[in-house]
Image (spheres, rainbow, N blue to C red):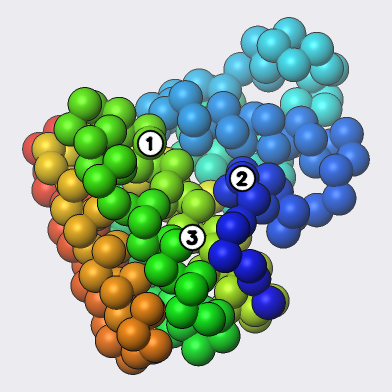
Amino acid sequence: MTNSNPTDPELKEQSTRAPRDAKYNLTERIRQKIIRENLPEGGPLREEALAREFSVSRPRVREALAVLEERGLVERIRNKGAVVATLSDREVSELFAVVEVVEALCVREATRNAPRETWEEARSWFGAEAEAAVKRGRIDVYESVLNRYRALIIDAADNNILRDIMDGLYDRIRVLVRRLLLVPDRAMIGIHEHRAILDAMCRDDPEEAERLARENLRSARRSIELYRRFLS
């Protein structure tokens, strides 16, 4: 069962993954580079440059990239090598369709499992301070809060199968989320939508929380589709 004061979301997320051996640590560091530095789709991932950056051998980098390829973050292109994975419009639509179902189910189970106090505290994360940060252009603050919320609902859902599914999906969705937050007003809309979800969770209403979680993901999906059309 979860508590109402979760640890840092990155640490919690890492705790759901493989043991921290050398291979895992390198994979995680490259994964964070892709996600946190907002590397562009199709951007090159040079083995030699990564080996220098992380002070490891090229074969170790190659192994780590192979793991990330399995997770859908990296792809290999003939005569070009490893690059940040590119998602087609269809793949983006399919990914959001799956995340909608799985995350909404996670919200429903979390609402059933955790006490209301858990969600009352989580609701404060999306309060005035988060709004003020977004107005100042600190989108990273909202992203951090969102990651914290997702770590909490995964923990509170207390379902290992759901945890494994969410873990894999979020590797791919977080790259899109960073781009999504560049859409004007999207972060503020997200704050209000998550407060509504958490209001339902505070009322101990898992069905309404699940419905609102689905609406939130559909809204995000529409925004990212508009953003991608704008860039095309």
Q: In the rendered structure, which amino acid carries the disc numbered 1? A: Val
Looking at the image, residue 226 sits to the left or right of residue 79; the answer is left
Residue 98 pos. (x, y %): 40, 71
Which residue sits at x=64%, y=71%? 2
- Mark 3 nearby-residue class (10 Å; few <14, some 14–19, many ≥20): some
Mark 3 / mark 1, whichever is N-terminal: 1
Q: Are marks 1 and 2 in contact (CB under 8 Å)?
A: no
Q: Nearer the viewer, mark 3 or mark 1?
A: 1
Residue 43 pos. (x, y %): 44, 24
Q: Nearer the viewer, mark 2 or mark 3?
A: 2
**Numbered label attached to residue 141:** 1
Residue 195 pos. (x, y %): 27, 64
Which residue matches tag 2? 8
In this rendering, does residue 172 appear at all? Answer: no
Which residue sits at x=59%, y=58%? 5
How many numbered marks appear?
A: 3
Picture quadrant where residue 62 is located: top right
Q: CA distance from mark 2 to mark 3?
A: 12 Å
Which residue sits at x=50%, y=89%? 112
Q: In the rendered structure, which amino acid carries the disc numbered 3? A: Arg
Looking at the image, residue 69 sits to the left or right of residue 93; the answer is right
Q: CA distance from mark 3 to mark 1?
A: 14 Å
Question: Is residue 11 or residue 48 the one in the foreground?
Answer: 11
The quarter in which the N terminus is drawn is: bottom right
Residue 147 pos. (x, y %): 48, 50
Which residue matches tag 3? 150
- Mark 2 nearby-residue class (10 Å; few <14, some 14–19, many ≥20): few
The quarter in which the C terminus is drawn is: top left
Q: Regarding mark 1 in the picture, which secondary structure is present there? A: helix
